[in-house]
Image: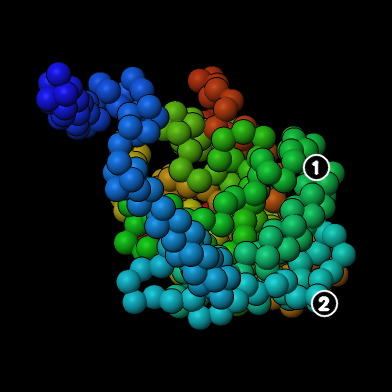
Amino acid sequence: MPATRKVVPRKRAQLSDEDSEPESLHSDALDDLPPKKRTHSSNSKSSSPSKPKPKRKKPKAKKDDVKDEEDVDDSDLKLKEGQQVVGRVVQAPKTGWVPPGQVSQNTLDFLVQLKDPACNDREWFKLREPVYRRIEKEFKEFVEAFTDMLTDVDSQIPPLPPKDVIHRIYRDIRFSNDKTPYKKGLSASFSRSGRKGIFAFFKPGDESVIAAGAWCPAKNELATLRNHLLRSTPAAKTLHTILSSKAFTTHFGPPRPHPHGDRQSVFGHEDELKVAPKGVDKNHEDIALLKCRSLAVSYRFTDAQVVASDFIDTLRGVADVMKPFVHCLNDLMTLPVDDNSDEEDEEDDTGSPEEDG
């Protein structure tokens, strides 16, 4: 009896040991009761699950990364290989700003920097974001005053908010060989519809411009305008009167094809046909106008004029002269041509454009 009692416990112990190992490693057993299986294991086995504790060392690496990021301003910049941040964020100047409705020298100085290819760069611009935001605020205030002046001069121009007339400073470089990301000036356009209207562009170096007219009008509009000229309608005669007026020639010079680099006059906006339009006599008295695909006038300002306190008043004087020209163009491109108009009226050569070969 004592012998049998000794053998039986040994077999049970062996069976329990052999069965416990595969059960503890079986995935189903781990899913069902993982805590209970671990309690039956030996001390060596119970200590093994606690080994993953060293994973706590990862936060130390993150702290190091944070320290590195704190050493550089704007750590979110995506720098190209070989590039590095060479300065901290530049804050807007504390002085030099002007009352609302004017343009400051700070604005022109910033645009001068954008003319430098080394500065016309996203990383450079990002570090000067506070400067640009302050300039943008000044330009919006100027455009508000400009809009008030234009709507007072020309009731056909709607009083739109600055966000609807200001152009973005970011260039569309998708189809351009010039990959500089930013324009070299600030601009806005004002019109009652389409591309007809007044356009203002501010660029340092005595290159600021106010322009008015029709840029690349639709084919049907251009055809209507040419029909008016060919038939010498009252609207066409009005155009001649405007172009030959003393106020117009004083501001823009006599009507002629656009000369490159000329300071004041533009007619045709560098966009004219090489030959006469189809079906038009090349010796027609209005051939210079008939060859134009865009009709526009512009006036340039010096930097001294732009930063002057009375710049809005200077713009008002030019806009006053532009208004009848813009209204006449709108009529020439929208009013139908009267087929019964008298084409044999006595010709008036006073306002006919000069015919350049």
- Where's residue 64, x and y in %? 49, 69
- Where's residue 117, x and y in %? 44, 75
Q: Is residue 251 above or below residue 42?
A: below
Q: Residues within 10 Å of mark 1 (few under 14, many from 20)?
A: some
Gap in angstroms between the C-alphas marked 1 and 2: 32 Å
- Where's residue 201, x and y in %? 62, 60
Left or right: residue 43 versus residue 336 is left
Residue at the spot of label 2: 95
* Labels 1 and 2: the sequence-earlier one: 2
Identify the secondary structure beneath mark 1. Answer: helix
Identify the secondary structure beneath mark 2. Answer: loop
On the image, which quarter does residue 113 sit in? bottom right
The residue that appears at 46% across and 43% down in the rendered structure is 216
The type of residue carrying mark 2 is Thr
The residue that appears at 76% across and 60% down in the rendered structure is 138
On the image, which quarter does residue 214 sit in? top right
Name of the residue lying farthest toward the bottom:
86
Dividing the image into 4 quarters, which one contains the C terminus?
bottom left
What sort of colour scheme is used for the picture? rainbow
The type of residue carrying mark 1 is Thr
- In this rendering, does residue 80 appear at all? yes
- In this rendering, does residue 247 appear at all? no
The residue that appears at 80% across and 42% down in the rendered structure is 151
Residue at the spot of label 1: 151
Q: Nearer the viewer, residue 259 or 132?
A: 132
Q: Residues within 10 Å of mark 2 (few under 14, many from 20)?
A: few
The residue that appears at 45% across and 65% down in the rendered structure is 61
- Where's residue 146, x and y in %? 78, 52
**Which one is closest to the eye, mark 1 or mark 2?**
2
